[in-house]
Image (cartoon, helix red, strand yellow):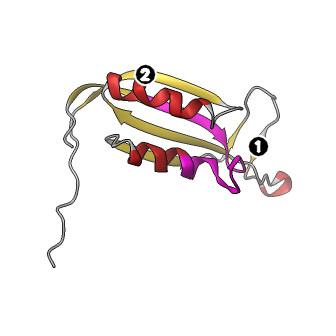
Amino acid sequence: MKLEGPATRLTVLIGESDQWHHRPLYHEIVRRAQEDGLAGATVLRGIEGYGASSRIHTTRILSLSEDLPVAVVLIDTEERIRAFLPRLDELVTEGLVLLDPVEVVRHAGREAEGP
């Protein structure tokens, strides 16, 4: 799928230790996005942050956290992103879900390698 022009970015901010059926929650979000055919997904691991609990999670050696912030970023058309939101409802019980309008300038993948 090629995506250019107006699009929507869905960002899900969760903790690295958040789980879905004994697997990382971020993995399940990406798996479902791919299953739904969304244009792209990326998981970014933060080095420091805090959320609604106001507890700081950090990679600093003296206060090493096992629950670092994670951002799952999904991009597609607004319609496809909004259609995906109900799939997040059962997954994300703690965290922050954001929608931003974006403009896709280039969306190009690698060419498939031959046999």
Q: Quarter holding the N terminus?
A: top left
Residue 101 position (above or below residue 93): above
Q: Which residues are magenta?
A: 10-28
Which residue does the image show at 21% across and 33% down from the upper left? 105
Label 1 vs label 2, nearer the camera: 2
Identify the image quadrant of residue 41: top left
Which residue does the image show at 53% across and 24% down from the upper left? 98
Camera-nearest residue between 91 and 112: 91
Dot 2, how many residues are within 10 Å of its Cα: few (below 14), some (14-19), or many (20+)? Answer: few
Camera-nearest residue between 48 and 26: 26
Which residue does the image show at 79% across and 38% down from the upper left? 56
Name the disc covering residue 2, or none.
none
Q: CA distance from mark 1 to mark 2?
A: 25 Å
Dot 1, how many residues are within 10 Å of its Cα: few (below 14), some (14-19), or many (20+)? Answer: many
Name the disc covering residue 57, or none.
1
Please indicate whether residue 16 sits to the left or right of residue 26 in the image.
right
Instruction: Name the secondary structure under disc 1.
Output: strand
Magenta highlight on residue 33? no
Q: Which residue is mark 2?
A: 100
The x and y percentages for residue 115 are: 16, 79
Q: Amino acid at mark 1?
A: His
Please indicate whether residue 92 sits to the left or right of residue 5 in the image.
right
Camera-nearest residue between 21 and 52: 21
Identify the image quadrant of residue 39: top left
Please indicate whether residue 41 sits to the left or right of residue 43 in the image.
left
Instruction: Name the secondary structure under disc 2.
Output: strand
Mark 1 or mark 2, earlier in chain: 1
Camera-nearest residue between 77 and 104: 77
The x and y percentages for residue 15 are: 69, 43
